[in-house]
Image (tube, rainbow, N blue to C red):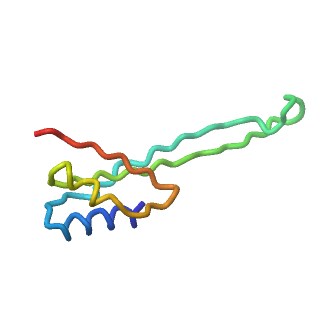
């Protein structure tokens, strides 16, 4: 995630656009607690699983046609990039 953020910021600054960020959003933790025993017999033992979602916000002040050029690089499979273009 950090590598993708630094690449996006460096490409935007290399093209001469003004950027703000990356701003770290608080980590969202999704927790699931399940019983270990499939039939319900025996002692009460529990498994705890969690998934952590990390988010970053980067503001790039550029035309919408340039956004595709800035984000056109190889990103790791575990990283998901969402783009929102604001109309002014």
Residue 6, horizontal then vertical, whole percent: 32, 67
Q: Is residue 35 above or below residue 13?
A: above
The answer to which quarter of the image holds residue 11 is bottom left
**At x 58% / y 40%, what residue is drawn?**
31
**At x 74% / y 40%, what residue is drawn?**
46
Q: How many marks?
A: 0
Say left or right for 70 vs 2: left
**At x 29% / y 51%, what residue is drawn?**
57
Residue 20, horizontal then vertical, whole percent: 19, 58
* Furthest residue in direction top, as rendered: 40
* Furthest residue in direction right, as rendered: 42
The answer to which quarter of the image holds residue 49 is top right
Q: Quadrant of the N terminus?
A: bottom left
Q: Pick the residue in front: 21 or 74.
A: 74
Q: Pick the residue in front: 59 or 42.
A: 59
Say left or right for 60 vs 27: left
Residue 37, horizontal then vertical, whole percent: 84, 36
Q: Is residue 67 above or below residue 30?
A: below
The answer to which quarter of the image holds residue 88 is top left
Q: Pick the residue in front: 10 or 36.
A: 10
**At x 27% / y 43%, what residue is drawn?**
84
Q: Is residue 28 above or below residue 60?
A: above
Q: Pick the residue in front: 39 or 11.
A: 11
């Amino acid at each position: 995630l950090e590598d993708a953020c630094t690449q996006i910021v460096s490409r935007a600054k290399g093209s001469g656009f003004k950027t703000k960020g990356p701003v770290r959003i608080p980590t969202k933790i999704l927790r699931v607690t399940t019983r270990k025993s499939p039939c319900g017999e025996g002692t009460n033992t529990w498994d705890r699983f969690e998934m952590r979602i990390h988010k970053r916000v980067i503001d790039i002040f550029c035309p919408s046609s340039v956004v595709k050029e800035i984000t056109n690089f190889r990103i790791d499979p575990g990283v998901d990039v969402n783009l929102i273009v604001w109309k002014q």
